[in-house]
Amino acid sequence: MSDDLPPVSRALAAQGVPHRVFRHAGPVNTLEQAAGERGQQPTQVIRSIVFHLGADSYAMVLVAGRSQVAWPALRAYLGRSRLTTATEEELLAVTGYERGAVAPFGLPAPMRILLDRSVLSHEEVSMGSGVRGVAIILRTADLLAALGEAEIGDFAVPA
């Protein structure tokens, strides 16, 4: 496997998951810019948001585009009265990735993955690759197959 591939691509390749690596020509400042450069709609860009559940427990929620996490629904689903998003330090420690490059693959340890139904609305999506400015593009069906035990639910609301 080539060392110039981002970590998420290496993890997907190890699972036999078909995907493409997309490298942006320059800095990406908005979700809309990222989508446009990838030839996608903003709702095809999947954001991976990590939540600190307490102690050393974390969960990652995948949402489409500008959708916002539905905090009451997420707290109820997880059975938690309080949730916080992971800090930059926590994010790097539990995923190995910086904010803006996070994805549910290639993680140093297993993490609970929740997938909002909004992610399922397109045949193809893109997500972080583990490296800022580089994305992974894949079929939604392949994403679902690769995630395996992901929990699907209504965890977000449209922006």
Image (cartoon, rainbow, N blue to C red):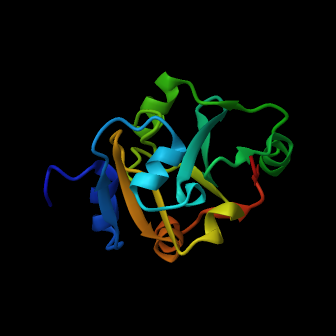
Can you see residue 103? no
Report the residue at 46% width, 34% height from top: 29
Question: For this rendering, which residue is in front, 42 or 16?
Answer: 42
Can you see residue 28? yes
Q: In which quarter of the image is residue 132?
A: top left
Q: How many marks?
A: 0
Question: For this rendering, which residue is in front, 120 or 56?
Answer: 120
Report the residue at 47% width, 45% height from top: 33
The quarter in which the N terminus is drawn is: bottom left
Q: Quadrant of residue 87?
A: top right
Q: Quadrant of residue 54?
A: top right
Question: For this rendering, which residue is in front, 67 or 104?
Answer: 67
Coordinates of residue 7 in the picture (x, y in percent)? 29, 49
Q: Is residue 82 left or right of residue 128?
A: right
Residue 117, placed above or below residue 35: below
Residue lying furthest left in this view?
2
Coordinates of residue 18 in the picture (x, y in percent)? 34, 73
Coordinates of residue 130 in the picture (x, y in percent)? 36, 44
Report the residue at 50% width, 74% height from top: 145
Residue 15, placed above or below residue 107: below
Coordinates of residue 131 in the picture (x, y in percent)? 33, 41
Report the residue at 62% width, 44% height from top: 59
Residue 84, placed above or below residue 106: above
Q: Is residue 23 left or right of residue 1?
A: right
Residue 88, placed above or below residue 147: above
Q: In this view, does 30 lie to the left or right of 128?
A: right
